[in-house]
Image (cartoon, rainbow, N blue to C red):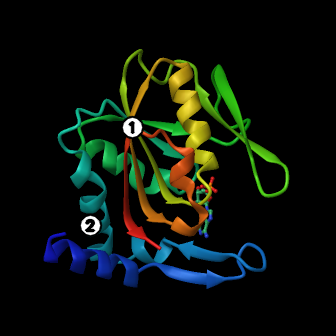
Amino acid sequence: MEKVDQSIKEYIKENIRTVNDFPKKGIQFKDITTLLQDKRALELTSYMLSKPFRHHNIDCVVGLESRGFLFGTNLAMDLNAGFVPVRKPGKLPAASISETYALEYGEDSVELHKDAIPENARVLIHDDLIATGGTAAAATRLVKRLGGEVVGYSFIIELSFLEGRKMLEDSTQIESILIE
Ligand code: AMP
């Protein structure tokens, strides 16, 4: 890795706050509000997110609710692509499709507008963080049901001990700025 990328990563890492026991005991929550409020960290994070995908001819960036929206539209603009939100149930106003995924206790679902992804569109899925990979995997199923092709995944932070990567498509490029 280039030396300059390493120092950028260190700066990004320094600007993410870890909050212990939020939203429940035992969780180390990665808070990116501190990253967003620092103008240099904001710019460097945007740069690092788009860098690996500049030459991938991405048509749509699919951002996952809700923190995947914060950098998602900017990432789309940097890649000359459109932005599509994947939302929690009941939030999208027009006809939508839904996918359910398992949580530690119980299940959750995510939704996508039926007309959001053109047939054969080249899609990049983005979120702030990948933990178990359940959310990104459900988003992948949504995109594929509409005929889109998932060509990559983009995260700021990857919690590697949860092995979320294993839930994602083998053949795609998975990029995380920070792997913890
Ligand atoms: P998962 O489906 O398990 O990969 O969880 C990913 C989603 O949960 C992302 O939208 C994250 O924003 C959120 N998330 C999970 N764990 C954390 C954490 N430790 N800190 C911040 N966000 C988290």
Residue extending furthest top? 119
Q: Which residue is mark 1?
A: 171
Q: Which residue is mark 2?
A: 43
Lateral position of residue 126 relative to residue 99, left or right: left
In this picture, is 129 found above or below 90? Answer: below
- Precedes in sequence: disc 2 or disc 1: 2
The x, y position of residue 63, in whole percent, is 48, 44
Is residue 37 depicted above or below 48 in this figure?
A: below
Tell how many labels: 2
Give the image quadrant in which the ligand numbered 1 is located.
bottom right
The part of the image, by quadrant, that contains residue 177 is bottom left
Q: Check disc 1 and report its element: helix, strand or loop.
A: loop
Residue 168 in sight in this render: yes
Mark 2–mark 1 Cα distance, whole angstroms, equals 29 Å
For label 2, being within 8 Å of ligand 1 is answered no
Residue 176 placement (x, y as % from top left): 39, 60
Nearer the observer, 170 or 50: 170
Give above or below for 96 relative to 55.
above
In this rendering, position of residue 115 left or right of residue 24: left
Residue at left offset 26%, top offset 68%: 44
Q: Nearer the viewer, mark 2 or mark 1?
A: 1
Q: Position of residue 36 (x, y in %)?
A: 41, 70
- Who is closer to the viewer here, 79 or 101? 101
Name the residue located 61 percent from the left edge and 47 percent from the top edge: 135
The quarter in which the N terminus is drawn is: bottom left
The amino acid sitting under disc 1 is Ser
